[in-house]
Image (spheres, rainbow, N blue to C red):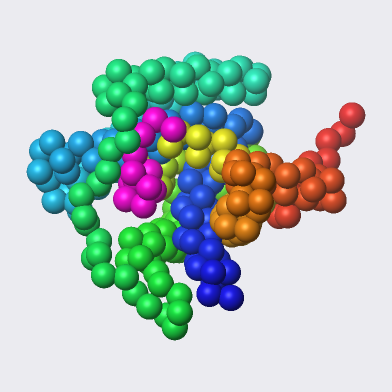
Amino acid sequence: MTFFMQMLVTGIVIGSIYALVALGFVLIYKASDALNLANGEFVLIGAYICLTLITAYQLNFFVAILITLAFNALLGLTVERVLLRPLLNAPVISVIMATIGLASLLGGAVHMIWGHQIRTYPQIFPATPIRFGDVIISPVYLWSFVIVMFLLIVFTLFFKFSKMGIAMRAVADDQQAALSMGISVKSVYAITWAIASVVAAVGGVLLGNINGVNASMAIIGLTVLPVVILGGLDSIPGAIVGGFIIGVLQSLAGGYLDPLVGGGLKEVVPFIIVVIILMIKPYGLFGKGGIERV
């Protein structure tokens, strides 16, 4: 039972980070009907930038993460302005292919600048483990969960009540109607990419503190894809719920099934779960199917 609880806690923490990164996927899809397949590289760059500021420039962690968030926001704005705005009226597949090219470009830049070796963050969070009965929780796990839940609540309130959040929801629902109400769709696109890049950076920093940083961290882009498909590509609550489901199932599979098959099943489980769910609910748990007049 103790081992199960330990795996459950690990899955909840990792799942919360998945949910945060998946939020960026959903925002971009709602705004443009396209998937950002470079999301994993945004995660990776955020993790490396923060680590470099701390280790090479000896900056305080909180100062470093603020600079990292600003850098990633600028990166998102630049990508939207230079790469994607010219494709505003292009077919969706063109935007998706552009993000694939962007992923290759950013991945190559990371390899040239930081190399391939695993790098670890210095001790930022307390080292003394926290006990809840027989379950031991590392402070980095607990703080990561608290930070992610705080950000998810902040973004939920932002989308629900702020002027820009309402504008983003309006553009996601109907671009032509939003334009007729005086909403700048281009500005909404830019802000959407900036937010997606920022949440990816936060996820990268937290994962870097847990597992260290190397180029393979970009694989989270593929891991989070089942999360957003499971929850529904156009559903923010679905991204959050899907993140927790995939995180917990992945952790349990790693703890119980990987030893039986020699490893590797943990990475496959999210895709198996998605296939099963989509056979029952083709638009995901919270997604909405579109109806078109033909």
Q: Quadrant of residue 48?
A: top left
**5 and 14: which is toward the camera:** 5
Query: Which residue is pictured at 41% across the width and 23% down the height?
Result: 107
Residue 52 in the figure: left or right of residue 45: left
Q: Is residue 113 above or below residue 227?
A: above
Residue 294 in the figure: left or right of residue 229: right
Q: Is residue 117 above or below residue 244?
A: above
How many marks can you see?
0
> Which quadrant would the N terminus be assigned to in this image?
bottom right
| 211 is within the stretch colored magenta | yes
Q: Is residue 221 above or below residue 149?
A: above
Query: Which residue is pictured at 46% across the width and 19% down the height?
Result: 104
Q: Outermost residue, bottom direction? A: 133
Q: Quadrant of residue 292?
A: top right
**264 and 278: which is toward the camera:** 264
**262 and 46: which is toward the camera:** 262
Query: Which residue is pictured at 32% across the width and 70% down the height?
Result: 129
Q: Which residues are magenta?
A: 204-216
Residue 192 image offset from top left, x and y in percent: 46, 39
| 118 is within the stretch colored magenta | no
Residue 71 image offset from top left, x and y in percent: 27, 35
Query: Which residue is pictured at 34% across the width and 39% down the height?
Result: 213
Residue 197 in the figure: left or right of residue 56: right
Q: Main secondary structure of the magenta part?
A: helix
**186 and 256: which is toward the camera:** 256
